[in-house]
């Protein structure tokens, strides 16, 4: 399945608004253009799905349990963490809002995974 198909399925199922669908398409393009990370179903399905659900949760004001501190400490120790923070700022610019701290941690987990895998290629 292509990521665009995944996004359409989420939208058709009422799990993703049109605005957030467009934002995620912009995020996919930004990662390719600015970070040379081509998202595919294989490397980006979990990230894209989580991002869709997170953006909808944020829009509805629904809370989420924060990432454990030891997980955040591990993320911060990774070489790619600074790049992931900058990518997160780009994502926030595309969606037009900062991520609440609880959601930010989860997005950073996905970004660090993507960036670390990309560095291994």
Image (cartoon, rainbow, N blue to C red):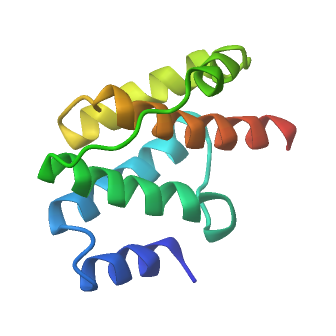
Identify the image quadrant of residue 97: top left
Identify whether 18 is placed above or below 10: above
Residue reaching furthest right? 120
Q: Nearer the viewer, residue 101 or 30?
A: 101
Which residue is found at the position 75% from the left and 41% from the top? 118
Q: Is residue 113 above or below residue 43?
A: above
What's the residue at 64%, 16% (across, down)? 73
Q: Across the whole image, how many numbered discs are drawn on residues?
A: 0
Residue 49 locus on image (x, y percent): 45, 63
**Residue 25 visible:** no
Residue in view at x 61 percent, y 41 percent: 36
Does residue 14 appear in the picture of this structure? yes
Q: Position of residue 5 (x, y in %)?
A: 44, 81
Q: Residue at x 63, y 27 (%)?
A: 71
Is 109 positioned to the left or the right of 103 in the image? right
Residue 90 position within the rendered picture, expressed as x and y whole percent measured from the top left:
37, 31
Q: Quadrant of the N terminus?
A: bottom right
**Splitting the image into 4 quarters, where does residue 88 fall?**
top left
In this rendering, position of residue 102 left or right of residue 117 = left
Left or right? Give the position of 44 relative to 107: right
How far across and down, in percent of the image, does residue 40 sit?
Answer: 62, 65
Q: Is residue 64 left or right of residue 50?
A: left
Query: Observer-nearest residue: 110 or 83?
Result: 110
Work out whether 18 lies above or below 9: above
In which quadrant is the C terminus drawn?
Answer: top right
Q: Nearer the viewer, residue 22 or 46?
A: 46
């Amino acid at each position: 399945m292509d990521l665009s198909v995944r996004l359409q399925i989420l939208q058709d199922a009422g799990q993703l608004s049109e605005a957030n669908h467009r934002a995620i398409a912009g995020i996919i393009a930004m990662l390719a253009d600015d970070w040379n990370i081509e998202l595919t179903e294989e490397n980006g399905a979990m990230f894209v799905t989580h991002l869709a659900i997170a953006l909808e949760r944020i829009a509805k004001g629904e809370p989420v349990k924060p990432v454990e501190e030891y997980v955040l400490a591990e993320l911060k120790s990774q070489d790619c963490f600074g790049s992931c923070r900058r990518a997160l700022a780009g994502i926030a610019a595309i969606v037009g809002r900062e991520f609440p701290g609880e959601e930010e941690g989860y997005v950073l987990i996905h970004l660090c995974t993507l960036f670390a895998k990309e560095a291994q290629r």
